[in-house]
Amino acid sequence: MTTLEGKELPDSSEFDFIVVGAGSSGCVVASRLSEDANVSVLLIEAGPSDTTDPRIDVPGYLALLQKTEVDWDFKTERQPHACKAFRGQVSTWPRGKVLGGSSAINGMAYVRGHKADFDSWEKLGCQGWGWKSVLTYFLKLENDLSSDKCTTHPSHHGRGGPLTVTKNQNFRTQISREFIKAGVELGYDEIDTNSGELMGFGDKWANIADGKRCSTATAYVHPYQHRPNFTVLTNAHVTQVQIDGKQATGLWYRYGHINRFIRAKREVVLSAGSIGTPQIMMLSGVGPKKHLEQLGIQCVADLPVGENLTDHMSLLVKATAKGSDAVTLNANLSQETALRYKRDRSGPMSSNCAQSTALLQTGLEPGLPWPDIQVQFLSKFYTVGPEEPSVTGIADPRLQRILGHNFSREERMRKEGVTFIVTLLHPKSIGDIKLRSTDPMDAPIIDPHYFEHAHDVKAMAEGVRIVKRLTETRALGQYQVKLVDLTMPDSNCSEFSDENLDALVRYFSTTLYHPSGTCKMGSTDDPTTVLDPRLRVRGIGGLRVVDASIMPHLTSGNTNAPIIMIGEKGADLIKEDYNVSSGLNIGSRL
Protein backbone atom coordinates (compact mmCIF):
# COMPACT_ATOMS: atom_id res chain seq x y z
CA MET A 1 0.00 0.00 0.00
CA THR A 2 1.26 3.44 -0.91
CA THR A 3 0.44 6.10 1.68
CA LEU A 4 0.85 9.63 0.37
CA GLU A 5 1.08 11.64 3.59
CA GLY A 6 2.41 15.07 2.68
CA LYS A 7 2.95 14.00 -0.95
CA GLU A 8 1.12 14.49 -4.24
CA LEU A 9 -0.11 12.26 -7.03
CA PRO A 10 1.31 12.83 -10.50
CA ASP A 11 -0.99 14.88 -12.77
CA SER A 12 -1.58 11.92 -15.08
CA SER A 13 -2.71 9.57 -12.30
CA GLU A 14 -5.58 7.17 -12.92
CA PHE A 15 -7.08 4.31 -10.97
CA ASP A 16 -9.72 1.69 -11.64
CA PHE A 17 -11.65 2.78 -8.55
CA ILE A 18 -11.45 6.00 -6.57
CA VAL A 19 -13.05 5.90 -3.11
CA VAL A 20 -13.75 9.34 -1.64
CA GLY A 21 -13.69 9.47 2.16
CA ALA A 22 -11.67 7.13 4.40
CA GLY A 23 -14.39 6.70 7.01
CA SER A 24 -16.49 3.89 8.40
CA SER A 25 -17.52 2.72 4.91
CA GLY A 26 -14.77 4.12 2.71
CA CYS A 27 -11.94 2.20 4.38
CA VAL A 28 -13.96 -1.00 3.98
CA VAL A 29 -14.78 -0.48 0.31
CA ALA A 30 -11.24 0.46 -0.71
CA SER A 31 -9.66 -2.40 1.21
CA ARG A 32 -12.05 -5.00 -0.16
CA LEU A 33 -11.66 -3.83 -3.76
CA SER A 34 -7.86 -3.93 -3.44
CA GLU A 35 -8.03 -7.66 -2.62
CA ASP A 36 -7.87 -8.22 -6.39
CA ALA A 37 -4.25 -7.56 -7.38
CA ASN A 38 -5.36 -6.68 -10.92
CA VAL A 39 -7.41 -3.71 -9.72
CA SER A 40 -5.92 -0.33 -8.77
CA VAL A 41 -7.64 1.50 -5.91
CA LEU A 42 -7.22 5.02 -4.55
CA LEU A 43 -8.62 5.96 -1.14
CA ILE A 44 -8.68 9.74 -0.80
CA GLU A 45 -9.21 11.53 2.53
CA ALA A 46 -9.52 15.25 3.35
CA GLY A 47 -7.94 14.86 6.77
CA PRO A 48 -4.57 13.55 8.00
CA SER A 49 -3.46 10.04 8.86
CA ASP A 50 -4.82 8.65 12.12
CA THR A 51 -1.24 8.15 13.26
CA THR A 52 -0.79 11.92 13.68
CA ASP A 53 -2.76 12.02 16.95
CA PRO A 54 -1.95 9.22 19.44
CA ARG A 55 -5.06 10.06 21.47
CA ILE A 56 -7.18 8.38 18.79
CA ASP A 57 -6.09 4.95 20.02
CA VAL A 58 -7.09 5.60 23.64
CA PRO A 59 -10.80 4.98 24.35
CA GLY A 60 -10.80 7.26 27.39
CA TYR A 61 -9.67 10.23 25.30
CA LEU A 62 -12.62 10.16 22.91
CA ALA A 63 -14.15 13.47 24.06
CA LEU A 64 -10.84 15.27 23.59
CA LEU A 65 -10.83 14.65 19.83
CA GLN A 66 -13.65 17.07 19.11
CA LYS A 67 -12.73 20.49 17.74
CA THR A 68 -9.25 19.33 16.75
CA GLU A 69 -7.74 18.95 13.29
CA VAL A 70 -9.34 15.48 13.00
CA ASP A 71 -12.89 16.87 13.38
CA TRP A 72 -14.90 18.66 10.68
CA ASP A 73 -16.72 20.47 13.52
CA PHE A 74 -19.93 21.11 11.60
CA LYS A 75 -22.79 23.14 13.07
CA THR A 76 -26.48 23.07 12.27
CA GLU A 77 -28.62 26.04 11.43
CA ARG A 78 -30.63 27.58 14.26
CA GLN A 79 -33.27 25.09 15.44
CA PRO A 80 -36.55 26.88 16.29
CA HIS A 81 -37.97 23.86 18.14
CA ALA A 82 -34.84 22.45 19.80
CA CYS A 83 -31.39 23.17 21.30
CA LYS A 84 -32.91 26.11 23.20
CA ALA A 85 -30.34 25.95 26.01
CA PHE A 86 -27.43 26.42 23.65
CA ARG A 87 -26.05 29.64 22.25
CA GLY A 88 -27.58 30.32 18.87
CA GLN A 89 -29.88 27.28 19.30
CA VAL A 90 -27.51 25.21 17.18
CA SER A 91 -26.17 21.69 17.55
CA THR A 92 -22.49 20.94 17.04
CA TRP A 93 -21.94 17.97 14.72
CA PRO A 94 -18.48 16.40 15.16
CA ARG A 95 -17.48 14.25 12.16
CA GLY A 96 -14.17 12.52 11.61
CA LYS A 97 -11.76 14.30 9.27
CA VAL A 98 -9.00 11.70 9.45
CA LEU A 99 -8.10 8.24 8.19
CA GLY A 100 -10.83 6.13 9.76
CA GLY A 101 -13.35 8.98 9.61
CA SER A 102 -15.87 9.10 12.42
CA SER A 103 -14.87 5.58 13.51
CA ALA A 104 -11.62 7.23 14.67
CA ILE A 105 -13.29 9.80 16.94
CA ASN A 106 -16.63 8.23 17.97
CA GLY A 107 -17.71 6.37 21.10
CA MET A 108 -16.81 2.97 19.59
CA ALA A 109 -20.32 1.57 20.20
CA TYR A 110 -21.25 -1.48 18.12
CA VAL A 111 -25.02 -1.85 17.71
CA ARG A 112 -26.34 -3.56 14.60
CA GLY A 113 -29.94 -2.43 14.92
CA HIS A 114 -33.21 -4.38 14.84
CA LYS A 115 -34.00 -6.85 12.09
CA ALA A 116 -37.21 -4.92 11.34
CA ASP A 117 -35.06 -1.92 10.33
CA PHE A 118 -33.54 -3.81 7.42
CA ASP A 119 -36.69 -5.72 6.50
CA SER A 120 -38.36 -2.32 6.26
CA TRP A 121 -35.62 -1.15 3.88
CA GLU A 122 -36.37 -4.13 1.67
CA LYS A 123 -40.11 -3.41 1.71
CA LEU A 124 -39.31 0.15 0.61
CA GLY A 125 -37.72 -1.21 -2.56
CA CYS A 126 -34.17 -1.96 -1.40
CA GLN A 127 -33.94 -5.52 -2.69
CA GLY A 128 -31.20 -7.54 -1.00
CA TRP A 129 -31.07 -5.34 2.10
CA GLY A 130 -33.33 -7.38 4.39
CA TRP A 131 -32.11 -8.73 7.73
CA LYS A 132 -31.13 -12.17 6.43
CA SER A 133 -28.98 -10.60 3.72
CA VAL A 134 -27.25 -7.99 5.86
CA LEU A 135 -26.63 -10.48 8.68
CA THR A 136 -24.22 -12.24 6.31
CA TYR A 137 -22.16 -9.06 6.17
CA PHE A 138 -22.26 -8.43 9.91
CA LEU A 139 -20.85 -11.92 10.37
CA LYS A 140 -18.24 -11.26 7.70
CA LEU A 141 -16.87 -8.10 9.30
CA GLU A 142 -16.87 -9.21 12.95
CA ASN A 143 -14.17 -10.73 15.07
CA ASP A 144 -16.15 -11.10 18.29
CA LEU A 145 -13.86 -11.67 21.24
CA SER A 146 -16.56 -11.85 23.92
CA SER A 147 -15.37 -14.56 26.26
CA ASP A 148 -18.85 -15.83 27.13
CA LYS A 149 -19.27 -17.02 23.52
CA CYS A 150 -22.43 -14.96 23.11
CA THR A 151 -24.57 -17.67 24.67
CA THR A 152 -27.90 -15.93 24.02
CA HIS A 153 -27.65 -16.11 20.24
CA PRO A 154 -24.31 -17.75 19.37
CA SER A 155 -25.16 -18.16 15.67
CA HIS A 156 -25.58 -14.42 15.29
CA HIS A 157 -21.96 -13.40 15.98
CA GLY A 158 -18.93 -13.66 13.71
CA ARG A 159 -15.32 -14.67 14.30
CA GLY A 160 -12.34 -14.07 12.07
CA GLY A 161 -13.46 -10.81 10.46
CA PRO A 162 -11.32 -7.65 10.33
CA LEU A 163 -13.18 -5.63 12.98
CA THR A 164 -12.71 -6.48 16.64
CA VAL A 165 -16.01 -6.53 18.53
CA THR A 166 -16.20 -7.22 22.25
CA LYS A 167 -18.43 -6.62 25.23
CA ASN A 168 -15.84 -7.76 27.78
CA GLN A 169 -13.61 -4.71 27.78
CA ASN A 170 -10.50 -4.32 29.90
CA PHE A 171 -12.55 -2.32 32.37
CA ARG A 172 -16.12 -3.06 33.43
CA THR A 173 -18.05 -1.47 36.29
CA GLN A 174 -20.40 -3.45 38.47
CA ILE A 175 -22.93 -0.62 38.35
CA SER A 176 -23.24 -1.12 34.58
CA ARG A 177 -24.34 -4.69 35.28
CA GLU A 178 -26.80 -3.46 37.90
CA PHE A 179 -28.38 -1.25 35.22
CA ILE A 180 -29.37 -4.43 33.38
CA LYS A 181 -30.73 -5.93 36.61
CA ALA A 182 -32.73 -2.73 37.14
CA GLY A 183 -34.39 -3.25 33.78
CA VAL A 184 -35.24 -6.85 34.63
CA GLU A 185 -36.64 -5.64 37.93
CA LEU A 186 -39.04 -3.41 35.99
CA GLY A 187 -40.21 -6.36 33.92
CA TYR A 188 -38.04 -6.06 30.82
CA ASP A 189 -36.05 -8.94 29.33
CA GLU A 190 -32.29 -9.30 29.49
CA ILE A 191 -31.26 -9.66 25.87
CA ASP A 192 -28.42 -10.01 23.43
CA THR A 193 -28.61 -6.46 22.10
CA ASN A 194 -27.04 -7.49 18.78
CA SER A 195 -29.33 -10.44 18.07
CA GLY A 196 -31.49 -8.17 15.92
CA GLU A 197 -34.65 -9.76 17.27
CA LEU A 198 -35.42 -8.57 20.77
CA MET A 199 -36.06 -5.53 22.92
CA GLY A 200 -34.87 -5.10 26.49
CA PHE A 201 -31.66 -4.55 28.49
CA GLY A 202 -28.23 -5.99 27.85
CA ASP A 203 -24.50 -5.59 27.45
CA LYS A 204 -23.19 -3.22 24.83
CA TRP A 205 -20.51 -4.24 22.37
CA ALA A 206 -17.65 -1.93 21.42
CA ASN A 207 -14.89 -1.72 18.82
CA ILE A 208 -12.07 -1.96 21.34
CA ALA A 209 -9.17 -4.37 20.90
CA ASP A 210 -6.72 -4.97 23.74
CA GLY A 211 -7.66 -1.65 25.33
CA LYS A 212 -7.28 0.32 22.07
CA ARG A 213 -9.79 1.77 19.61
CA CYS A 214 -10.42 -0.43 16.58
CA SER A 215 -11.40 1.96 13.80
CA THR A 216 -11.95 0.94 10.18
CA ALA A 217 -8.48 2.31 9.43
CA THR A 218 -7.07 -0.05 12.05
CA ALA A 219 -9.13 -3.00 10.80
CA TYR A 220 -9.16 -2.53 7.03
CA VAL A 221 -6.32 -0.24 5.95
CA HIS A 222 -3.18 -0.54 8.07
CA PRO A 223 -2.93 -4.37 7.86
CA TYR A 224 -2.71 -4.25 4.07
CA GLN A 225 0.26 -1.98 3.49
CA HIS A 226 1.86 -4.71 1.39
CA ARG A 227 -0.65 -4.29 -1.45
CA PRO A 228 1.02 -2.36 -4.29
CA ASN A 229 -2.38 -1.70 -5.94
CA PHE A 230 -3.78 0.15 -2.90
CA THR A 231 -2.98 3.87 -2.59
CA VAL A 232 -4.08 6.15 0.26
CA LEU A 233 -3.95 9.93 -0.25
CA THR A 234 -4.54 12.09 2.83
CA ASN A 235 -4.99 15.86 3.26
CA ALA A 236 -6.68 16.00 -0.13
CA HIS A 237 -10.09 17.74 -0.22
CA VAL A 238 -12.32 16.46 -3.04
CA THR A 239 -14.18 19.36 -4.61
CA GLN A 240 -16.09 17.87 -7.54
CA VAL A 241 -16.76 14.72 -9.52
CA GLN A 242 -16.01 15.16 -13.22
CA ILE A 243 -19.12 14.12 -15.15
CA ASP A 244 -18.85 14.00 -18.95
CA GLY A 245 -22.25 13.58 -20.48
CA LYS A 246 -23.86 11.16 -18.06
CA GLN A 247 -20.66 9.38 -17.02
CA ALA A 248 -18.38 10.04 -14.04
CA THR A 249 -14.83 9.99 -15.36
CA GLY A 250 -12.81 11.18 -12.38
CA LEU A 251 -12.65 13.88 -9.77
CA TRP A 252 -11.05 17.15 -8.80
CA TYR A 253 -9.39 17.62 -5.45
CA ARG A 254 -7.54 20.40 -3.68
CA TYR A 255 -4.10 19.64 -2.32
CA GLY A 256 -2.79 22.67 -0.48
CA HIS A 257 -3.88 25.53 -2.73
CA ILE A 258 -3.64 23.57 -5.97
CA ASN A 259 -6.57 21.91 -7.80
CA ARG A 260 -5.72 18.54 -9.32
CA PHE A 261 -7.55 15.93 -11.39
CA ILE A 262 -7.52 12.12 -11.10
CA ARG A 263 -9.12 9.83 -13.65
CA ALA A 264 -11.32 6.89 -12.67
CA LYS A 265 -11.21 4.13 -15.28
CA ARG A 266 -14.17 2.28 -13.80
CA GLU A 267 -15.96 4.07 -10.99
CA VAL A 268 -15.95 6.89 -8.47
CA VAL A 269 -17.32 5.74 -5.10
CA LEU A 270 -18.48 8.47 -2.72
CA SER A 271 -18.08 7.48 0.94
CA ALA A 272 -17.77 10.97 2.38
CA GLY A 273 -20.71 10.56 4.76
CA SER A 274 -24.18 12.04 5.04
CA ILE A 275 -22.79 15.58 4.91
CA GLY A 276 -19.79 15.34 2.62
CA THR A 277 -21.31 13.06 -0.01
CA PRO A 278 -24.37 15.21 -0.82
CA GLN A 279 -22.18 18.32 -0.82
CA ILE A 280 -19.79 16.81 -3.40
CA MET A 281 -22.69 15.53 -5.50
CA MET A 282 -24.44 18.90 -5.60
CA LEU A 283 -21.18 20.70 -6.45
CA SER A 284 -20.90 18.22 -9.33
CA GLY A 285 -24.37 19.04 -10.68
CA VAL A 286 -26.23 16.09 -9.16
CA GLY A 287 -29.06 17.30 -6.94
CA PRO A 288 -32.30 19.27 -6.80
CA LYS A 289 -32.40 21.27 -10.02
CA LYS A 290 -34.01 24.38 -8.53
CA HIS A 291 -31.44 24.61 -5.72
CA LEU A 292 -28.49 24.08 -8.06
CA GLU A 293 -29.70 26.63 -10.58
CA GLN A 294 -30.10 29.22 -7.83
CA LEU A 295 -26.36 28.88 -7.26
CA GLY A 296 -25.52 28.87 -10.95
CA ILE A 297 -24.60 25.18 -11.07
CA GLN A 298 -25.62 23.29 -14.19
CA CYS A 299 -27.83 20.34 -13.21
CA VAL A 300 -26.80 17.08 -14.87
CA ALA A 301 -29.18 14.91 -12.84
CA ASP A 302 -32.24 16.27 -11.02
CA LEU A 303 -32.31 14.12 -7.88
CA PRO A 304 -33.37 14.76 -4.23
CA VAL A 305 -29.78 14.82 -2.94
CA GLY A 306 -29.53 16.28 0.57
CA GLU A 307 -33.13 15.55 1.46
CA ASN A 308 -34.34 12.87 3.91
CA LEU A 309 -31.79 13.92 6.55
CA THR A 310 -32.43 12.13 9.84
CA ASP A 311 -30.45 12.01 13.05
CA HIS A 312 -30.71 10.48 16.50
CA MET A 313 -31.50 13.13 19.09
CA SER A 314 -30.26 12.40 22.60
CA LEU A 315 -30.70 13.80 26.09
CA LEU A 316 -28.07 13.29 28.79
CA VAL A 317 -29.73 12.72 32.16
CA LYS A 318 -27.21 12.92 34.99
CA ALA A 319 -27.41 11.24 38.39
CA THR A 320 -25.17 11.24 41.42
CA ALA A 321 -24.21 7.88 42.92
CA LYS A 322 -22.16 6.31 45.69
CA GLY A 323 -19.70 3.54 44.98
CA SER A 324 -16.06 3.11 44.05
CA ASP A 325 -16.82 2.02 40.48
CA ALA A 326 -19.14 4.91 39.59
CA VAL A 327 -16.43 6.85 37.79
CA THR A 328 -16.18 10.12 35.91
CA LEU A 329 -14.38 10.83 32.67
CA ASN A 330 -12.25 13.42 34.43
CA ALA A 331 -11.17 10.72 36.88
CA ASN A 332 -10.33 8.58 33.83
CA LEU A 333 -7.85 11.26 32.84
CA SER A 334 -6.10 11.33 36.22
CA GLN A 335 -2.41 10.54 36.50
CA GLU A 336 -3.14 7.25 38.26
CA THR A 337 -5.43 5.91 35.54
CA ALA A 338 -3.10 7.19 32.82
CA LEU A 339 -0.20 5.25 34.35
CA ARG A 340 -2.36 2.15 34.66
CA TYR A 341 -3.31 2.40 31.00
CA LYS A 342 0.29 2.92 29.95
CA ARG A 343 1.34 -0.11 31.98
CA ASP A 344 -1.08 -2.70 30.56
CA ARG A 345 -3.85 -0.84 28.66
CA SER A 346 -6.42 -1.59 31.37
CA GLY A 347 -8.58 0.50 33.68
CA PRO A 348 -11.08 3.26 32.91
CA MET A 349 -9.06 4.68 30.01
CA SER A 350 -9.35 1.37 28.15
CA SER A 351 -13.15 1.71 28.04
CA ASN A 352 -15.74 4.06 26.58
CA CYS A 353 -17.65 3.59 29.89
CA ALA A 354 -20.82 2.79 27.89
CA GLN A 355 -21.06 -0.88 28.75
CA SER A 356 -24.82 -1.43 28.96
CA THR A 357 -27.82 -0.32 26.94
CA ALA A 358 -31.56 -0.74 26.60
CA LEU A 359 -33.67 -0.88 23.43
CA LEU A 360 -37.27 -0.16 24.39
CA GLN A 361 -40.72 0.85 23.23
CA THR A 362 -42.46 3.81 24.82
CA GLY A 363 -45.92 2.47 23.91
CA LEU A 364 -46.91 5.72 22.21
CA GLU A 365 -47.33 3.82 18.93
CA PRO A 366 -48.78 0.35 19.56
CA GLY A 367 -47.65 -2.27 17.08
CA LEU A 368 -44.26 -0.79 16.25
CA PRO A 369 -41.95 -3.51 14.86
CA TRP A 370 -38.84 -1.95 16.45
CA PRO A 371 -37.80 -0.07 19.60
CA ASP A 372 -38.38 3.67 19.50
CA ILE A 373 -36.13 4.62 22.45
CA GLN A 374 -32.61 3.65 23.43
CA VAL A 375 -31.20 4.26 26.90
CA GLN A 376 -27.43 4.00 27.08
CA PHE A 377 -25.80 3.74 30.48
CA LEU A 378 -22.47 5.43 31.19
CA SER A 379 -20.55 4.72 34.37
CA LYS A 380 -19.61 8.35 34.70
CA PHE A 381 -21.29 11.57 35.74
CA TYR A 382 -19.74 14.01 33.29
CA THR A 383 -18.58 13.71 29.76
CA VAL A 384 -16.88 17.11 29.80
CA GLY A 385 -17.14 20.34 31.74
CA PRO A 386 -18.30 23.76 30.54
CA GLU A 387 -14.76 24.98 29.99
CA GLU A 388 -13.91 22.17 27.54
CA PRO A 389 -14.21 23.30 23.89
CA SER A 390 -16.37 20.37 22.78
CA VAL A 391 -19.40 21.59 24.73
CA THR A 392 -21.85 23.92 23.03
CA GLY A 393 -22.12 27.03 25.20
CA ILE A 394 -25.09 27.35 27.56
CA ALA A 395 -27.01 30.57 26.95
CA ASP A 396 -28.62 30.84 30.41
CA PRO A 397 -26.31 30.22 33.42
CA ARG A 398 -29.32 28.98 35.43
CA LEU A 399 -29.39 25.93 33.16
CA GLN A 400 -25.89 24.78 34.15
CA ARG A 401 -27.42 22.89 37.07
CA ILE A 402 -29.33 20.43 34.87
CA LEU A 403 -26.18 19.51 32.92
CA GLY A 404 -24.19 19.31 36.14
CA HIS A 405 -21.93 22.13 35.06
CA ASN A 406 -22.45 24.08 38.27
CA PHE A 407 -19.56 22.18 39.87
CA SER A 408 -15.96 23.29 39.57
CA ARG A 409 -13.47 21.13 37.71
CA GLU A 410 -11.98 19.99 41.01
CA GLU A 411 -15.41 18.96 42.27
CA ARG A 412 -16.09 17.05 39.06
CA MET A 413 -12.83 15.17 39.50
CA ARG A 414 -14.16 13.83 42.79
CA LYS A 415 -17.81 13.47 41.79
CA GLU A 416 -19.26 9.98 41.56
CA GLY A 417 -22.23 9.43 39.34
CA VAL A 418 -23.71 7.98 36.18
CA THR A 419 -25.32 9.24 32.99
CA PHE A 420 -28.36 7.94 31.14
CA ILE A 421 -28.41 8.84 27.44
CA VAL A 422 -32.02 8.84 26.22
CA THR A 423 -32.09 8.55 22.43
CA LEU A 424 -34.96 8.90 19.95
CA LEU A 425 -34.41 6.07 17.47
CA HIS A 426 -36.97 6.78 14.73
CA PRO A 427 -37.64 10.52 14.49
CA LYS A 428 -40.56 11.80 12.48
CA SER A 429 -38.83 15.16 11.98
CA ILE A 430 -36.91 15.12 8.69
CA GLY A 431 -34.25 17.64 7.68
CA ASP A 432 -32.07 18.51 4.69
CA ILE A 433 -28.64 19.62 3.57
CA LYS A 434 -28.08 22.37 1.01
CA LEU A 435 -25.07 24.11 -0.45
CA ARG A 436 -24.10 27.35 1.24
CA SER A 437 -22.20 28.48 -1.84
CA THR A 438 -20.31 27.10 -4.81
CA ASP A 439 -17.09 27.22 -2.79
CA PRO A 440 -16.30 23.58 -1.86
CA MET A 441 -14.45 24.78 1.24
CA ASP A 442 -17.63 26.30 2.69
CA ALA A 443 -19.50 23.99 5.07
CA PRO A 444 -22.98 23.18 3.74
CA ILE A 445 -26.24 24.34 5.30
CA ILE A 446 -27.28 21.62 7.77
CA ASP A 447 -30.87 21.81 8.99
CA PRO A 448 -32.11 18.65 10.76
CA HIS A 449 -35.47 20.30 11.62
CA TYR A 450 -35.22 18.84 15.12
CA PHE A 451 -38.56 18.37 16.93
CA GLU A 452 -40.67 19.89 14.18
CA HIS A 453 -42.91 16.89 14.78
CA ALA A 454 -44.39 17.00 18.29
CA HIS A 455 -44.41 13.20 18.58
CA ASP A 456 -40.61 13.19 18.83
CA VAL A 457 -40.71 15.31 21.98
CA LYS A 458 -43.34 13.07 23.60
CA ALA A 459 -41.26 9.95 22.91
CA MET A 460 -38.16 11.53 24.44
CA ALA A 461 -40.17 12.56 27.50
CA GLU A 462 -41.32 8.97 27.97
CA GLY A 463 -37.69 7.91 27.84
CA VAL A 464 -36.90 10.26 30.73
CA ARG A 465 -39.77 8.75 32.73
CA ILE A 466 -38.30 5.28 32.13
CA VAL A 467 -34.97 6.53 33.50
CA LYS A 468 -36.73 7.85 36.59
CA ARG A 469 -38.28 4.41 37.22
CA LEU A 470 -34.88 2.77 36.82
CA THR A 471 -33.39 4.94 39.56
CA GLU A 472 -36.12 3.73 41.92
CA THR A 473 -35.17 0.04 41.59
CA ARG A 474 -33.34 -1.97 44.23
CA ALA A 475 -30.52 -2.69 41.79
CA LEU A 476 -29.55 0.97 41.40
CA GLY A 477 -30.82 1.95 44.84
CA GLN A 478 -27.85 0.25 46.47
CA TYR A 479 -25.69 2.91 44.79
CA GLN A 480 -27.99 5.73 45.96
CA VAL A 481 -28.50 6.80 42.35
CA LYS A 482 -30.31 10.14 42.37
CA LEU A 483 -31.16 12.25 39.34
CA VAL A 484 -30.11 15.88 39.27
CA ASP A 485 -33.01 18.29 39.65
CA LEU A 486 -34.66 18.40 36.20
CA THR A 487 -37.07 21.22 37.01
CA MET A 488 -36.70 24.00 34.47
CA PRO A 489 -36.07 27.57 35.74
CA ASP A 490 -39.25 29.59 36.27
CA SER A 491 -41.32 26.41 35.94
CA ASN A 492 -44.47 26.11 38.01
CA CYS A 493 -44.91 22.47 36.98
CA SER A 494 -43.78 19.30 38.68
CA GLU A 495 -40.48 17.79 37.58
CA PHE A 496 -41.94 14.94 35.50
CA SER A 497 -45.04 16.71 34.20
CA ASP A 498 -45.69 16.91 30.46
CA GLU A 499 -44.99 20.65 30.48
CA ASN A 500 -41.65 20.44 32.30
CA LEU A 501 -40.39 17.45 30.30
CA ASP A 502 -41.43 19.11 27.03
CA ALA A 503 -39.26 22.11 27.93
CA LEU A 504 -36.41 19.92 29.21
CA VAL A 505 -36.31 17.91 25.98
CA ARG A 506 -36.50 20.96 23.72
CA TYR A 507 -33.80 22.80 25.67
CA PHE A 508 -31.16 20.13 26.22
CA SER A 509 -31.50 17.44 23.54
CA THR A 510 -28.82 17.45 20.88
CA THR A 511 -27.23 15.14 18.32
CA LEU A 512 -25.95 11.64 19.04
CA TYR A 513 -23.78 12.04 15.92
CA HIS A 514 -25.80 9.74 13.63
CA PRO A 515 -26.80 11.76 10.53
CA SER A 516 -28.05 9.61 7.67
CA GLY A 517 -30.30 9.30 4.65
CA THR A 518 -29.25 12.23 2.43
CA CYS A 519 -28.72 10.03 -0.66
CA LYS A 520 -31.59 7.62 -0.11
CA MET A 521 -31.56 4.26 -1.88
CA GLY A 522 -34.66 2.46 -3.05
CA SER A 523 -36.78 1.60 -6.04
CA THR A 524 -36.08 3.59 -9.19
CA ASP A 525 -39.83 4.18 -9.38
CA ASP A 526 -39.67 6.14 -6.11
CA PRO A 527 -39.05 9.85 -6.82
CA THR A 528 -37.63 10.34 -3.29
CA THR A 529 -34.63 8.10 -4.01
CA VAL A 530 -31.17 9.03 -5.28
CA LEU A 531 -29.72 5.52 -5.61
CA ASP A 532 -30.90 2.15 -6.83
CA PRO A 533 -30.52 -0.85 -4.46
CA ARG A 534 -27.05 -1.48 -5.92
CA LEU A 535 -26.11 2.02 -4.68
CA ARG A 536 -25.66 3.43 -8.20
CA VAL A 537 -26.60 7.08 -8.71
CA ARG A 538 -29.71 7.22 -10.87
CA GLY A 539 -28.98 8.47 -14.36
CA ILE A 540 -25.20 8.77 -13.93
CA GLY A 541 -22.80 6.00 -14.93
CA GLY A 542 -19.64 5.23 -12.98
CA LEU A 543 -20.84 6.92 -9.79
CA ARG A 544 -21.88 5.09 -6.65
CA VAL A 545 -22.49 6.00 -3.00
CA VAL A 546 -21.52 3.73 -0.10
CA ASP A 547 -21.98 5.33 3.32
CA ALA A 548 -24.65 6.34 5.88
CA SER A 549 -26.35 8.63 3.38
CA ILE A 550 -27.88 5.62 1.57
CA MET A 551 -30.15 4.67 4.50
CA PRO A 552 -33.88 4.99 3.72
CA HIS A 553 -34.40 5.52 7.46
CA LEU A 554 -32.32 5.24 10.62
CA THR A 555 -31.56 1.97 12.34
CA SER A 556 -32.47 1.21 15.95
CA GLY A 557 -29.26 2.14 17.74
CA ASN A 558 -25.79 3.57 17.18
CA THR A 559 -25.09 3.62 13.46
CA ASN A 560 -21.39 2.80 13.08
CA ALA A 561 -21.94 -0.97 12.82
CA PRO A 562 -24.58 -0.67 10.05
CA ILE A 563 -22.34 1.78 8.17
CA ILE A 564 -19.45 -0.70 8.21
CA MET A 565 -21.88 -3.39 7.04
CA ILE A 566 -22.93 -1.06 4.20
CA GLY A 567 -19.26 -0.82 3.23
CA GLU A 568 -18.93 -4.61 3.11
CA LYS A 569 -22.09 -5.12 1.05
CA GLY A 570 -21.33 -2.14 -1.18
CA ALA A 571 -17.90 -3.57 -1.98
CA ASP A 572 -19.47 -6.88 -2.98
CA LEU A 573 -21.98 -5.12 -5.24
CA ILE A 574 -19.11 -3.34 -7.02
CA LYS A 575 -17.17 -6.58 -7.34
CA GLU A 576 -20.17 -8.30 -8.89
CA ASP A 577 -20.74 -5.48 -11.38
CA TYR A 578 -17.09 -5.42 -12.51
CA ASN A 579 -16.17 -9.09 -12.04
CA VAL A 580 -13.61 -8.25 -9.37
CA SER A 581 -12.36 -11.22 -7.37
CA SER A 582 -12.73 -11.52 -3.58
CA GLY A 583 -10.11 -12.16 -0.94
CA LEU A 584 -10.88 -12.84 2.73
CA ASN A 585 -13.49 -15.46 3.54
CA ILE A 586 -16.76 -14.70 5.26
CA GLY A 587 -15.61 -15.54 8.76
CA SER A 588 -16.95 -18.22 11.08
CA ARG A 589 -19.68 -18.11 13.67
CA LEU A 590 -19.06 -18.51 17.36
Image: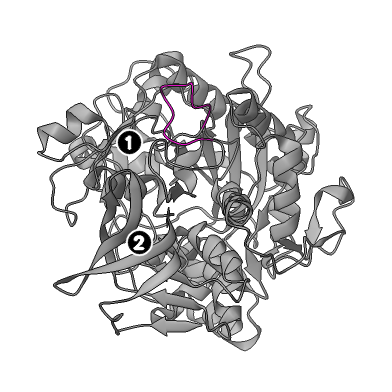
Query: Is residue 134 shown left or right of residue 311?
Result: right
Vertical order, 43 against 368 (above or below): below
Q: Is residue 524 magenta?
A: yes
Report the mark closest to the observer, 2 or 1.
1
Q: Is residue 72 visible?
A: yes
- Return the residue nearer the eye: 259 or 322: 259
Residue sitting nearer the eye, 369 or 378: 369
Point out the tag, 2 or 1, that comes first from the N-terminus: 2
Secondary structure character of the magenta stretch overall: loop
Circle 1 SS class: loop
Q: What stretch is highlighted in magenta?
A: 522-532
The three-letter amino acid code for the residue at tag 2 is Gln
In this orientation, does residue 484 appear? Answer: no
Location of residue 23 in the rendering, given as x and y in whole percent from the top left corner = 46, 61
Colouring method of the image = one colour
> Image quadrant of residue 170?
bottom right
**CB within 8 Å, label 2 to label 1:** no
Name the amino acid type tagged 1. Gly
**Residue 519's spot in the image, x, y percent?**
41, 38
Q: Which mark is residue 418?
A: none
Pointer 1 residue: 306
- Residue 571: within the magenta? no
Which quadrant is home to the C terminus?
A: bottom right
The foreground one among 243 and 108 is 243
Q: Name the residue under label 2.
A: 66
Does residue 404 sit above or below 465 in this rendering?
below
Residue 412 quadrant? bottom left
Q: Which residue is drawn at 9% across and 39% down?
A: 296
In the image, residue 429 lies at what x, y percent?
Answer: 40, 23
x and y percentages locating residue 502 in the rendered image: 40, 20
Gap between marks 2 and 1, in whole Å? 24 Å
